[in-house]
Amino acid sequence: MPAVTPNPSTQPDAGRPLTRRTSWAEAAAAADAAKPAAPVPARTRAPASAPVQPSALDTVTSIPGDRPWDAVPTPSDAPSETPAFRRARPTVADTIADRPMPDFTSSPGLFVKEQKPRPVGGVRGAIFNMTGGAWNMGPGAKQRQEEELGRRISRQLQGSYNTAVLSLKGGIGKTSTTVGVGLTLAEYRGDAPCAIDANPDSGDLVERALGEGIYQQSSPRTITDLLRNIDSIDSLTGLARYMHHAGRLHLIAGEQDPEVSDSLTAEEYLRIRKLIAAYYSVALTDCGTGVTHNAMSGILQSADNLVIAAGYAVSGAKRARSTLHWLASHGYEDLARNAIVVITDKDEVSSRVDKDAIKEHLSGICRELIAVPHDRGVADGDLVTLDVLKPETRRAYKEIAAAIVDGYR
């Protein structure tokens, strides 16, 4: 837009110096002339510790054609500043800063009240259910003992461990103990256990875990088939082709052919044990009857602890004691000292048998002695499942499983 130069003769203030204005400058000047100039607010004082030095802005000059601004007082003209108010008490921020920060990770109980575990069964459980949880008396002594057994069984392990189950006499609960304890380990442990049938006399470990009918319908692969192809197995998937499964319990079947059932050597068993150790943290080995068959030296060499099966008959107790003495005198003294003796009342002995005397006869020469009561689910020699066992029998298997895991050091 072209600049417009006003005619000096038409200006009201002809005596003032001429100022070159544009149209918007003229409008602004007219607006300023129509209203009085607003006073400029006083500057905010600077803190006393940092006085502001006078600058060119502190002195206001008149602008030609406009009203002069009100003079702004310089810092030297300002009244002296009053002393700042100081608090006599510490502030909330000071109090928080002086207190240590609580550890929310290691001490959650500082902020959340610990809740009692829920009681199950008994009078405590009934009261809890009737009041909708308002009255929680906590678990009783029996429930706390059961929970402690579960914690012992489920303890995390570093490495792979092997427990050998053996006896000098057949038919006294060795295989049923292996199956019952194996199923208990599978129930409480996060990792699946493995059970190996190394019985030279056509062992029936898998039949007792699966049932005769299911085993016959499944692929009849045995420990012999595993040995024949062991060099080609390099994964758990490849190993699973030679295993059977009773829930989370994985099993290797024993050889059923009498002509080759006694051919498993110590070296062959050690090869199997090395393969199993790569994929399982807990293994149970059903050794069969006796301690002198071909594979026994390899089994004892790789065992971390032993379970020795015995019965309430006087002859069974004597054989268990003889087994411990044999182990101690043949270089396996630690295994004998830390052995777990399991007495199974398989035949429901009469009241004439002094059970306490048999227990006393075996105690003191082993780490722990556990009795399994008479149970039709064990004595029939057929399928062993935890669901059909008596509570006392299941409790005994839990005690055996906990004692086994306790021995893994």
Image: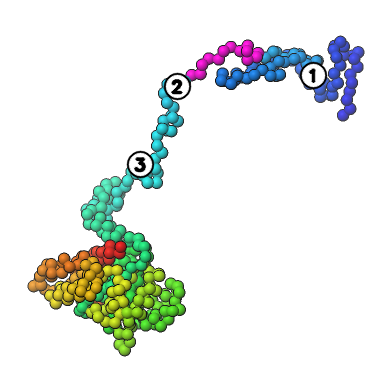
Mark sitting on residue 29 = 1
Q: Is residue 77 above or below residue 381?
A: above
Q: Residue at x 29, y 77 (%)?
A: 297
Pointer 2 residue? 87
Q: Amino acid at mark 2?
A: Arg
Q: Amino acid at mark 1?
A: Ala
For residue 104, which quarter of the picture?
A: top left
78 or 130, nearer to the observer? 78
Residue 143 at x, y percent in the picture:
25, 56
Pointer 3 residue? 110
Q: Residue at x 29, y 52 (%)?
A: 118
Q: Earlier in the sequence, mark 2 or mark 3?
A: 2
The type of colouring in the image is rainbow
Q: Is residue 210 magenta?
A: no
> What segment is highlighted magenta in the picture?
73-85
Mark 1 → mark 2, Cα distance in angstroms: 52 Å
